[in-house]
Amino acid sequence: MFLGAHMSIAGGLHMAFDRIRAVDGTALQIFTRNQRQWKIPPLTKYDIELFTVAREEWGDYPIAAHDSYLINLASPDKELVRRSRSGFSQELQRVEALSIPFLVTHPGSHLGQGVEAGIKRYAANLDKAIEDSDTRSCLVLLETTAGQGTNLGSTFEELARIIELSAHPDRLGVCFDTCHAFAAGHDIRTPEAYAATFDAFDRTIGLDRLKFFHVNDTKTPLGSRKDRHEHIGQGEIGIPGFRNLMQDPRFSNVPKTLETPKEPDLKDDVRNLNILRELAGKA
């Protein structure tokens, strides 16, 4: 079982490993840079060496990076698309330089232009960014979204359509965020609802493309289309929903990371991870 959290890179990329070790995590997600700025500083050889050594000390566990929230490859704005393509291409180059296998990304917002138009723009710009990056190994994981506003990716059909349109489907997978999916209307609280949700995912996308989970409870009701993360068991999904996931043998080796609220002491992560381990019978 690979279970961990998103960790800060404050003090350097390598510091994320000190933090994940502090909570006994065996899966990790990071940003590779300040995700609230367009400017991307170059990775130095020293940065990469520090990261590599710290990772080896942590162990042979899965890691993903998340791209900047500023990036919108589905935008109709030409200048934003230009910056987004460049930014995403550089993100791919950074994760490949760091030997990170996954880059998680939100599928963008169509900004009033319509879902199909947004999906077509997104797929075309994603392809261009992949090609411009000249990378070969990293998988881009399209994250399930809550469907706020004009955001794409709240339905399995939208994610499947992006993959269908892409010229690089071999580079694409999915990250399933429990909070986002629930807010989008995909219930996992009962065994029956859970089975129906993942049966639909399998029919539409294929479970073989599901490479990563974000395990987050949610403050808002089923179908609310609002992205509001909550501690495990304290939100609308509740303990039964996470028990269904943690005891599903199909996903026992799929990495799962928290994105729940926390303080610098990481006690919230420890508590949430302990709950998930207990639900999996691994405590």
Image (spheres, rainbow, N blue to C red):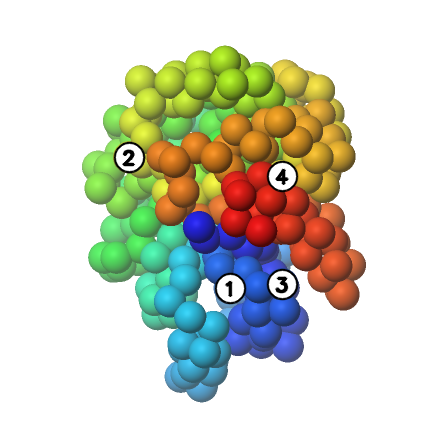
Position of 15 relative to 126 (above/below): below
Q: Quadrant of residue 137?
A: bottom left
Say which residue appears at 43% left-offset and 33% top-offset.
Answer: 248
Say which residue appears at 72% left-offset and 61% top-offset.
Answer: 266
Residue 131 in view here? yes
Q: Are marks 1 and 4 in contact (CB under 8 Å)?
A: no
How far, Cα to Cα, is label 1 from label 2? 26 Å
Left or right: 76 in relation to 37? left
Rendering coords of residue 151 (x, y %): 55, 28
Reading the image, the residue beneath label 2 is: 208
Residue type marked 1? Thr
Position of 24 relative to 180 (above/below): below
Q: Earlier in the sequence, mark 1 or mark 4?
A: 1
Circle 1 or circle 4, nearest the eye? 4
Reading the image, the residue beneath label 3 is: 23
How far, Cα to Cα, is label 1 from label 4? 21 Å
Q: Are marks 3 and 1 in contact (CB under 8 Å)?
A: no
* 122 vs 216, nearest the viewer: 216
Q: Earlier in the sequence, mark 4 or mark 3?
A: 3
Reading the image, the residue beneath label 4 is: 216
Q: Earlier in the sequence, mark 2 or mark 3?
A: 3
Residue type marked 2? Asp
How far, Cα to Cα, is label 3 from label 1? 20 Å
Q: Secondary structure at mark 2?
A: helix
Q: Which mark is residue 32?
A: 1
Q: Secondary structure at mark 1?
A: loop
